[in-house]
Amino acid sequence: MPCRLLCVGDLNADVTVSVEGGISVGSDTPGTVVMSGGGSAANVAAWAAEAGSAARFVGVVGSDPLGSFLIDDLAGHGVEVYVTRRHDAATRAIAAIVEADGNRSMVSALDPATVLASDDIASSWFDDVDWVHLTAYTYLQPAGRETFAQLVATIESLSIPWSVDPSSAQMLASRCRREDVATAFDGASILFPNTDEASWLADAEDPVVAAERLLDVSETVVVTCGADGAVIARRGLPTFRIPAAPTDLVNTLGCGDAFAGGFLSGRLHGHDDLASAGMAADVAVRAARSAGSR
């Protein structure tokens, strides 16, 4: 399996609650509840492996049975897993409420104990690696900002291209200054925001305008726009859109991660941005048909 992608960041359980109508506050609501492996960085690794790229994941879980389940589940997707087990921490779970139209709202508990620390970083992670993908879930914790900066410094010292997913517009806006985030992400080869994240980072509502402004931060910007497809901007080349691939939508959870995994796999196999985006859209369709994020 050609090409080694290293994804560094979050691995957690997704508890997905799907309802056909609204929540009946104070009473029972018919629906389904599914627990599966999740975490943005872990999802990207799993979908990249699905798309044909050798993938490695690095992250943190607790020493509890849930942590063991998540490690085994991710390995079952063909990902090489390097995980630190924290004996004083519980493995994180994220609650996702999916409504009838497939859109989801998430409740995320960011426990500092399950975020990588600078002391965790090992040179062996980067052996035979062609690309590194990061997420802002590491950066969002104040203690994780030093780790994020050290990861970027290590990656760049090894001349490895890297990408980053801003992860959460709401959390970035409530916890961070825009200029600090732009500085932290500066030098990325690819930035993977969704429309809300791109809008906040670029201070622009239109995703095309936002993508082109963010070229000051990253060489390539890929804005995922849900049912409106994606916008791809790259320095020195015309910006273009691709439509979302038609599908019977079950769940949008993990679709952006699947798109990133497919796009990175295309890039690692030497495809141009248009071909990589087409590959990404096909992978995202598979995620949209799934009850979980991978």
Image (spheres, rainbow, N blue to C red):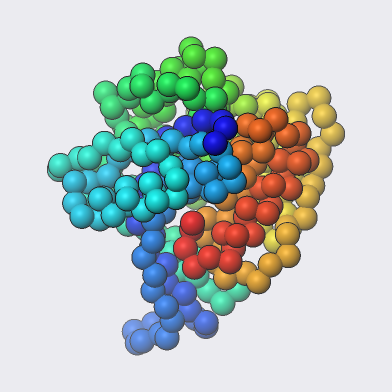
For residue 90, above or below residue 59: below
The x, y position of residue 99, in whole percent, is 53, 74
For residue 164, above or below residue 44: above
- Of residues 154 and 203, the one nearer the viewer is 154
Q: How many marks?
A: 0
**Residue at horizontal 67%, vertical 38%?**
266
Q: Quadrant of residue 87?
A: top left
Quadrant holding the N terminus: top right
Given the current orientation, which residue lies at the most extreme front position? 1
**Residue at horizontal 48%, vertical 42%?**
45
- Of residues 35 and 72, the one nearer the viewer is 72
The answer to whether residue 159 of the structure is visible from this angle is yes
For residue 197, above or below residue 97: above
**Residue at horizontal 55%, vertical 43%?**
48
Instruction: From the viewer's perspective, tell me whether residue 133 is left or right of residue 208.
Output: left
Instruction: From the viewer's perspective, tell me whether residue 275 is left or right of residue 283.
Output: right
**Residue at horizontal 68%, vertical 67%?**
247
Given the current orientation, which residue lies at the most extreme top position? 157
The answer to whether residue 24 of the structure is visible from this angle is no
Q: Quadrant of residue 118?
A: top left
The x, y position of residue 105, in whole percent, is 48, 63
The x, y position of residue 72, in whole percent, is 32, 50
Instruction: From the viewer's perspective, tell me whether residue 289 is left or right of residue 36.
Output: right
Given the current orientation, which residue lies at the most extreme right position? 238
